[in-house]
Image (cartoon, rainbow, N blue to C red):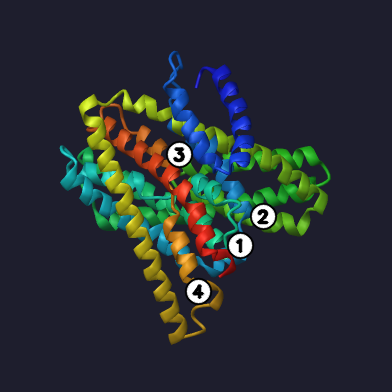
Amino acid sequence: MENYSIIIFILAIMVVLSAVSDKIRLPYPVLMVAVGIAMGFLPGMPEIEISPEVVMLIFLPPLLYDAAFNISFKTFRTNLNTIGTLAIGLVFLTTCAIAVIARYVIPGFTWPLAFVLGSILAATDAVAAISITKGLGLSHTTATILEGESLVNDASALVAYRFAVAAVTGVAFVLWQALIQFLILMGGGFLVGMLMGKLLSFFLVRLKDNTMAVFSFLLLLPFVTYLIAEHLHVSGVIAVVVLGLGISRFTKKVFPEALQVQSKSVWDILIYLLNGLIFILIGLEFPMVIRRIDAHEVWPFVGYAFLITVTALVLRIVRVEWQRGNLWRAFRARKGRISRDALLTLQESIVIGWSGMRGIVSLAIALGLPANFPQRDAIIFIATVVVLFTIIGQGLTLPLVVRKLKPGNA
């Protein structure tokens, strides 16, 4: 992103669009994506390509940290069973389902390539999920499950992605090695996040009277934690999430209320700018990727993307409803094993199933494929269209589903 004046211009448009979306009652992520697409087709508009490194280092750490910081740890722990089912089991199940479609429907896709596409689109995105559902009046449980799932599932998808890419480049897939790597990624990320949380707590206690120093540490540590975890080849995503959960509990106990309010104000502004910029950049990406595809392939690829979107959505709805039934059966069989607070209503199950948008992380992973990777342009185009289908389609219909079901009152 070398044209900084364009970025400033985009930020200015973003602020205006945010105000407009409130007036017309349109989810602002949907409006910003649509405007981003329109801007991308303007004559003379310079290409602003999303850099995977920028997304993973500049955007992801603060957004994950803020979401983890504001999530209810108690509710997160109560619903850990459901969150784990969606963030791990459903990710690998979705990867396989998309791979089957890609292998048998999309011409030229081998099994390794099909699994690469599946792993790119398997995980929901924290930014999209939180932005679309915010302000819809969801029940506390529903919001926590959606946020918790999208905070954790990137690690699962990245493991599947690494092994699928390795298979394309000639490295054999070994199941036990994949399982060990997954455990190392998750466990190592947890350990790094916990240690960095302890370190940050140590400094914050001693600097709590120095407001500027406190804010500086709170702003820098998510980036530092992510970098350290990735340097150690463990999950930076999990490390930042654990850091956010830990610091949230710590600051509520130690910081005076005035300092907590000031800190929240600073983070709210930062997250507001990053969120808006991300959705406009997603929209801007579409005109760029469509130019790389032959004209006669555009509509078939859009059709493949639609089929993948519907399949992933149906699979998600079925899996969430199955999980709801499992929880109720476990509760009736042995009440001590499952808390009543962890049970899902039918309304909550439908809303959770209808959610699960794909977003900036899927695009970043796709764009991070090597330049000479087989079917690279096709994979990026299909991934981009799926992201747009989920953000626009589910973004427009989710408020209607929520108002119809009123899960917050269930």
**Label whose residue precedes the other's in the sequence (3 or 4):** 4
Look at the image and tell me whether residue 371 can be seen. yes
Asked which secondary structure carries label 3, the reply is: helix
**Label whose residue precedes the other's in the sequence (4 or 2):** 2
Looking at the rendered image, the quarter that the C terminus falls into is: bottom right
| Dot in front, 4 or 1 | 4
Asked which secondary structure carries label 2, the reply is: helix
Residue that extends furthest to the top in the rendered view of this protein:
44
Q: Is residue 59 left or right of residue 364?
A: right
**Label whose residue precedes the other's in the sequence (1 or 2):** 1
In the rendered image, which residue does mark 1 sit on? 73
Q: Position of residue 318 (x, y in %)?
A: 34, 64
Q: Amino acid at mark 2?
A: Ser
Q: Position of residue 379 (x, y in %)?
A: 29, 36
**Label whose residue precedes the other's in the sequence (3 or 1):** 1
Front residue of 370 and 268: 268
**Label whose residue precedes the other's in the sequence (2 or 3):** 2
**Label whose residue precedes the other's in the sequence (4 or 1):** 1
Q: Amino acid at mark 1?
A: Phe
Q: Is residue 211 left or right of residue 356?
A: right
Q: Position of residue 360 (x, y in %)?
A: 45, 39
| Dot in front, 3 or 1 | 3
Mark seen at residue 36: none
Q: Amino acid at mark 4?
A: Leu
In the rendered image, which residue does mark 4 sit on? 343
For marks 2 and 3, give the CA distance: 25 Å
Mark seen at residue 248: 2
Mark seen at residue 360: 3
For marks 3 and 4, give the CA distance: 31 Å
Count neighbours of disc 1 (C-alpha within 10 A) and say few if under 14, some if 14 to 19, many if 20 or more: some
Count neighbours of disc 3 (C-alpha within 10 A) and say few if under 14, some if 14 to 19, many if 20 or more: many
